[in-house]
Amino acid sequence: MSWPHRFRRRGAVALLAGTLVGGVLLAPSARADAGPPAPAREHLTDLVNPFIGTENEGNTYPGAAVPFGMVQLSPDTGHTTGYDYQQDHIRGLSLTHISGVGCGLGGDLPVLPTTGDITETDDAKYASAYSHDDEEAHPGYYRVGLKTYGTQAEATATERTGKQRYTFPATDKANVLLNAGQSLHRTVSTEVEVLDSRTVRTAITGRGFCQDTVPYTVYTITRFDRPFTSYGTWADGKVTAGSASSAAREGGNGAYVRFDTRKDRTVEATTALSYVDAAGAARNLKAEGGSSFDRARRAADATWEKRLGTVAARGGDETLRRTFYSSLYRSFLAPNLGGDVDGRYTGWDQKKHRAKGFTYYQNWSLWDTYRTQTQLLSLLAPREARDMALSVLRVGKESGWLPKWGYGTVETNIMTGDPVTPFLTNAYQQGLLKGHEEEAYRALRKNADGVPPADSPAVGREANAPYLKDGFAPYIKDRPHAKPGDSDFDHGGSATLEYALSDAMLSRMAKDLGHDADARRYAERAQNYRKIFDPSTGFFRSRDASGAFTGPADPARSEGFHEGTAWQYQWLVPQDLPGMIGLIGGQDAARQRLDSFFAYDQLVADPAGTAREVWVNGPYDYYNADKYNPQNEPDLIAPYTYLSTGQPWKTTDVVHAALTLFTDTPTGMTGNDDLGTMSAWMVLSAIGVYPVQPGTATWSLSTPVFDRVDLTLDKRYYPAGRFTVTAPGTSAEKRYTQSVRLDGADWDRTYLTTDDLRAGRRIDFAVGTDPSAWGTAPGDAPPAVTPSQP
């Protein structure tokens, strides 16, 4: 707690009832047969630190947002993705941000309160110095003092608006700069218009995320709480006082408004956003912009409190609790509302549509989120997760193809493989697609069996033609990209594994729906991981277009694997780990290889040190490594492989060591958060229930780090409305599962299904200081989704 500005706290954590005993919050009383008493209620938002991940390329943002909101009003310091804790100037508070992306995206309409004459229109030049000692962040609220101008900026948010409050010195030249022409990505055209003495409207068209993309347009309208005394616009560096409108292609463009603050030093403003049109922004402003700043701030806090309250974690020290609830907070930041209050949205066909019977969402980092965050939302936010799945189906219907990595109203084609399939099959397996099963299946079958046409912005399963013919996606080095974004041909080895994983999950869905021939066909394709196994090296290896293995034989120097090596991708066969283990020589060989991969002997002696000094560390350190990379997606599932080798205690050793990498500091993220992916990994692993086979209804078990976690669940999907996980006395020393009981009955398997969660009410772990025989029998591991044929 050496940096008191880091987040907003209401003094000590308030105990509403009960007492503090042995570091554990206890309720005043509990029935003797009800198990350990529930903790007294904390104010959970006080535990959240939005600055976590703002340094060392975690690429999170500290600004104001509500769960899944359209607006993320947050400061930009000049970093590619928005805010960098090490930078010392703020260029403005802009409306749109994505938590943990690796390239510039969003940052539309940075706004800054200044004083004096306006002599600069480049936000890098008029940026204000600031200090972390005069900065704070809290779920739904952000505040900073701007030294250069002696001003203060505060931000809060509703779903579709960002509210600002500025405190100026006493002056007749108190300015608010609205910069339409500068974003975190490329701006291709902008318009600004002063509508009246309180209102400014903009239209901003931008493009780009890592590479160039199809343009998208966002419309804004900003309403001030009192008239400004004067105004003007600028374009390409030229300021024109009294001008009410300005338009520009690429280049600077913006408006300023001026207030006299010699008597009243505060100015409030509300900015509404729409991806549809200016009328949509105005409707959103009318619907959500009427409350005061303080009332909106309280509402945002209450919304977050309710959302975080779906998980009541008991035990753990204060740092662990802050880290856990901060991770839970980030897990609920995206995807984001894409539709206006009247249900209208802009589809990927760039036409206007209206959502009926569901809420439309956008922003799909599917290569990342299909592994963890998708499952967490299906558990804790199934209503929203249903609407998110239906939104993805709308993308497929309106654009002709399901998305890969979508931002706003466009496809970026960033990352590779086929992530939309496990995303949607997970929704199906969790019961979120009732009434839409066949619609989803048809879209997935089209995606799995074809390639988007040349006139489609999507790349889909780009290497599908050779994959369907030969059983693998070829690695073709330096092949020209046919469309903007990433290419599966650049990453043939990993694309093959991702395609095969998706085929397995689609096979299960096809079988459930009675499409037996398809089910058999996809199950056979799920075995295509074998086509890139090189017996001479004992590892996966990319093949070229002729079928020859290519790239270095050393699996730590392999080529054709997206953000990883063959060492790291060898475990990405969740559909058939028994088959994979057989390929590399059986369980003894797999155990030895896993021990080497995790540096297990060193890990047991020094878990935290090994995690930081031996495993791969560095947010973009993807290649030339033979060790576990806990900072990137391909390895997220790897620790749970030990369950399939009859050594579940080693999963706990690795997971608990990896959890030490999450800390309550600006550097406390493991790499990019990628729209909550890494945060969701932390939450699920800390609870001890993890989606070991993404795209199915299977959850693996490992020792929790909390004594008790109570999950409040939606009764429409989980009839009991609650599920409890206990592990009394769990600690760094007592971390090994001795036995498990599900609703009082012995449970030897190392996994649950969603049906088990729905039928049950609690799972209890007994823990000890030494490994046990629990979960070590051959039938205790999660079964293959599409097993190898003898």
Image (cartoon, helix red, strand yellow):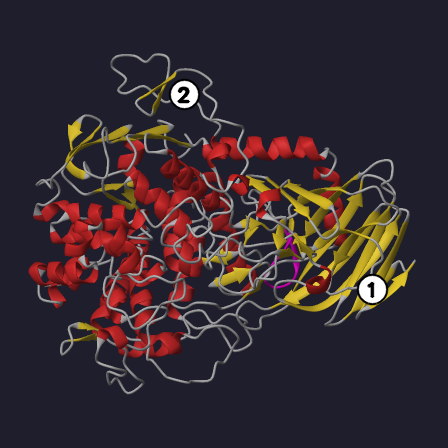
Q: Residues within 10 Å of mark 2 (few under 14, many from 20)?
A: many
Pinpoint residue 75: horizontal percent, then vertical percent: 62, 52
In the drawing, does residue 564 fall left or right of residue 404? left
Q: Residues within 10 Å of mark 1 (few under 14, many from 20)?
A: many
Q: Which residue is mark 2?
A: 40
Q: Is residue 455 above or below residue 220?
A: below
Q: Quadrant of residue 751?
A: top left
The foreground one among 500 and 274 is 274
For the N terminus, the quadrant is top left
In the drawing, does residue 457 fall left or right of residue 256? left
The foreground one among 611 and 252 is 611
Numbered-mark total: 2
The answer to whether marks 1 and 2 mark residues whose Cβ atoms lie closer than 8 Å is no
Q: Which residue is mark 1?
A: 234
Pinpoint residue 742: horizontal percent, then vertical percent: 21, 31
Q: Is residue 289 above or below residue 245?
A: above
In the drawing, does residue 423 fall left or right of residue 252? left
Pinpoint residue 708: horizontal percent, then vertical percent: 30, 29
Q: Residue at x 41, y 85 (%)?
A: 478
Look at the image and tell me whether residue 783 can be seen: no
Badge 1 marks a residue whose secondary structure is strand
Q: Is residue 130 above or below residue 323?
A: below
Which residue type does callout 1 highlight? Trp
Badge 2 marks a residue whose secondary structure is loop
Q: Residue at x 12, y 58 (%)?
A: 591
What range of the chain is rendered magenta?
345-354
Which residue type does callout 2 highlight? Ala
Q: Quadrant of residue 705?
A: top left
In the drawing, does residue 13 fall left or right of residue 540? right
